[in-house]
Image: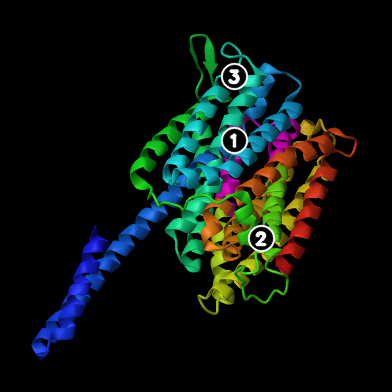
Amino acid sequence: MIEQSNQRQAATVAQSLAGTRSETDIENNKELIKEISIDEFQESEKDSLISVLGVVLISAQFSLDTTTYLTSVISLINSIKPDREAHYLYVTQAVSAAVQVIASFLVGYIASYCRSVKYVLIICFLFSVTGNMVYSSSGVKALDSIGALIGGRALTGIGSASAALAYSYIVLVAKSSERSYKYFKIFRASGAIFMTIGQILSIALSYCNFYIKGYKINSSNAPTYGAAFLIFLLSIALVFILENPRPKAPLSPLAIVKRLYGTNHRTNQSASSISTRVKPVLILLNGFISTFVIASQMYFLPIFYSLRVGWSDRNQSINCIIILVVSTVLSIVYQNFLKSCLRTSNTSNAIYFENRIMGIISNFMAIIGMAIMLAIWKAYGSHNGRSNKNFGFPVAFSIGITLGFTGYNTQAGCIPSLFKSVVKPELQVVIMPFLGISTGIGKLLAPIIIGAIYASPAGAPMGIGLALICGTFAIALFYVI
């Protein structure tokens, strides 16, 4: 309403200026134009703050779902199926990721069909709430079912499609390349902050030790009950905070392919010489690799600290908080440093080049981190390495994971920005969630492949080595796109 009023006032001023003759009238009209400009600027700033707050809150669901269960999942599985922790860990992660892939593929079409990104996001949050409740109630004396545990994580996988739809929301509320790049970075940094909050929540609720109708609430399920309650509150807040941009009606898959790869495809004038028709696929492949690498690290995180080092759930949560906080700070600091060194202008070409360089450097950091993890795993001894009391090994392993998370945080900001720059605006609402598909496939395949390698005679060193090789390949992709 304010914008329409300002437009009418501006039109009146323009007409008045066209017909005025006296200097006094002209000066008065200039003052009126100045007031209108200030009002529009203030309204724009208000909208910008609301948009940023919305982006921040959207990141909460998938972040909390990623971390609150991670340090206690081994304990909960062990209470239902003893001695099968590693097997059911990768089954649980794989099923959740598979459901997320399917949901991410559909969520863009659903939002376009319903002409609302906002309410589809809120529905995703409610799926997450339900999934966490089912997962938390899967233990003995309640549902007592490993199927309920896996099913609960599958429902949170549907909820995590919100991360894919968030890309569509960002491109709708942030019009320029500079602003969307800023929002993508805020989205990733906020995700890391909520992951930290998730671990703090895990520590606080790990002290729970009471019964409800015979079902014990303790460190293995209290954190995910808490996550369900917090995500429910956030879903209510999103009703009032999120903007509701109306995407265009969805195109058929054939029409999308024609527009994406048609002869009139928009080109990006970067230094790269590779065809712009191949760039979207390569960028999606980079999204897959970055998630595969970090999911591989997350697979080994509970195994190393629970089964090899023998840390409690609470100690693992404290360790995760340190990893998340340090990696988030490192990624913000070095991204801003690189931006000051690389940015020559705010043009789309300069931003595109900057994101490519950041992607290359972040993969180098991830490779160094995985090399440290590989060395520590080899040095720590056999599978029953709990007898090894050298505290330096777990710390060094955490340093390796921290470097991996730092690289991932950076890529989670620059890859969406790169992808947006090579996709036509009219396709972005439907196509941007494909990033969620590529990352979901990475989350799906990592526990399956890495879990199979871990169970084989090659063991964990081969699994970590495979992730290291993938990170090296990603550097080549960032170089050519």
Three-letter residue code for mark 2: Pro
> What residue is drawn where x is 56% and y is 43%?
321
Marks 2,1: beta carbons within 8 A? no
10 Å crowding of disc 1: few (<14), some (14-19), many (20+):
many
Three-letter residue code for mark 1: Gly
- Which picture quadrant has residue 84? top right
Q: Is residue 428 magenta?
A: no
Marks 2 and 3, the one that precedes in the sequence = 3
Instruction: Give me the disc on residue 280.
Output: 2
Residue identified by numbered label 1: 157
Q: Quadrant of the N terminus?
A: bottom left
> What residue is drawn where x is 19% and y is 70%?
9
Q: Quadrant of the C terminus?
A: bottom right
Select label 2 or label 3 by which is in front: 2
10 Å crowding of disc 2: few (<14), some (14-19), many (20+):
many
10 Å crowding of disc 3: few (<14), some (14-19), many (20+):
many
In terms of depth relative to the viewer, which is nearer, 205 or 282?
Answer: 282
Marks 1,3: beta carbons within 8 A? no
In terms of depth relative to the viewer, which is nearer, 453 or 201?
Answer: 453
Q: What kind of element bears circle 3?
A: loop
Residue 308: x and y in percent read 76, 33
- Which picture quadrant has residue 135? top right
Instruction: Give me the disc on residue 138.
Output: 3
Residue range corresponding to the magenta coloring:
298-327
Marks 2 and 1, the one that precedes in the sequence = 1
Vertical position of residue 311 compared to residue 271: above or below: above
Q: Overall secondary structure of the magenta stretch? A: helix
Vertical position of residue 428 compared to residue 192: above or below: below
Taking the image as shown, residue 384 lies to the left or right of residue 165, namely right
Marks 1 and 3, the one that precedes in the sequence = 3
Three-letter residue code for mark 3: Ser
